[in-house]
């Protein structure tokens, strides 16, 4: 696999996991004990920490990409394994 292709696949993993990990580790104003603003949703986060969230997504994406690349090199699961119709 070309390194540019590998980077593109990793970037896709990173963006996907950054989106999937959004609800984890976030506390609401009620959980923190802060006063809510009028009209604020009950589920609105108290404070969103961007850097720790991106680091978490990068680590999970690195693990997932390592598994993907190992499967690419060693061929554990191939396209024929996923052909359930024939």
Image (spheres, grey):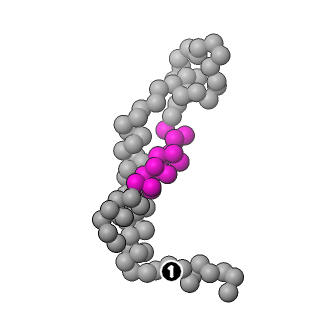
Q: Quarter-wise, where is residue 61 in the image? A: bottom left
- Residue under the point 37% across and 52% down: 59
Q: Position of residue 4 (x, y in %)?
A: 32, 62
Q: Main secondary structure of the magenta part?
A: helix
Q: Is residue 60 visible?
A: no
Which quarter of the rendered picture does the C terminus lie within? bottom right
Q: Position of residue 82 (x, y in %)?
A: 59, 78
Q: Is residue 25 above or below residue 74?
A: above
- Queried whether the magenta region covers residue 26, the answer comes back as no
Residue assigned mark 1 = 78
**85 left or right of 23 in image:** right
Which one is nearer the viewer's eye here, 4 or 45?
Answer: 4
Which quarter of the rendered picture does the N terminus lie within? bottom left
Q: Quarter-wise, where is residue 45 in the image? A: top right
Q: Is residue 25 visible?
A: yes
**83 left or right of 11 in image:** right
**17 left or right of 80 in image:** left
Q: Position of residue 64 (x, y in %)?
A: 43, 61
Q: Which residues are magenta?
A: 10-25
Q: Is residue 47 above or below residue 18?
A: above
Which one is nearer the viewer's eye here, 71 or 83?
Answer: 83
- Queried whether the magenta region covers residue 18, the answer comes back as yes
> Quick one: label 1, few (<14), some, or many (20+) residues within 10 Å?
few
Q: Is residue 38 above or below residue 68?
A: above
- Residue under the point 38% across and 70% down: 69
In the displayed orientation, state which residue is furthest to the left: 3
Which one is nearer the viewer's eye here, 32 or 47?
Answer: 47
């Amino acid at each position: 696999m070309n390194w540019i292709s590998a980077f593109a696949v990793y970037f896709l993993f990173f963006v996907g996991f950054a989106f999937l990990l959004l609800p984890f580790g976030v506390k609401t104003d009620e959980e923190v004990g802060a006063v809510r603003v009028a009209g604020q949703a009950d589920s609105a986060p108290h404070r969103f920490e961007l850097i720790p969230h991106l680091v978490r997504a990068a680590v999970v994406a690195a693990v997932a990409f390592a598994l993907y690349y190992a499967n690419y090199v060693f061929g554990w699961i191939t396209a024929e394994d996923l052909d359930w119709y024939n």
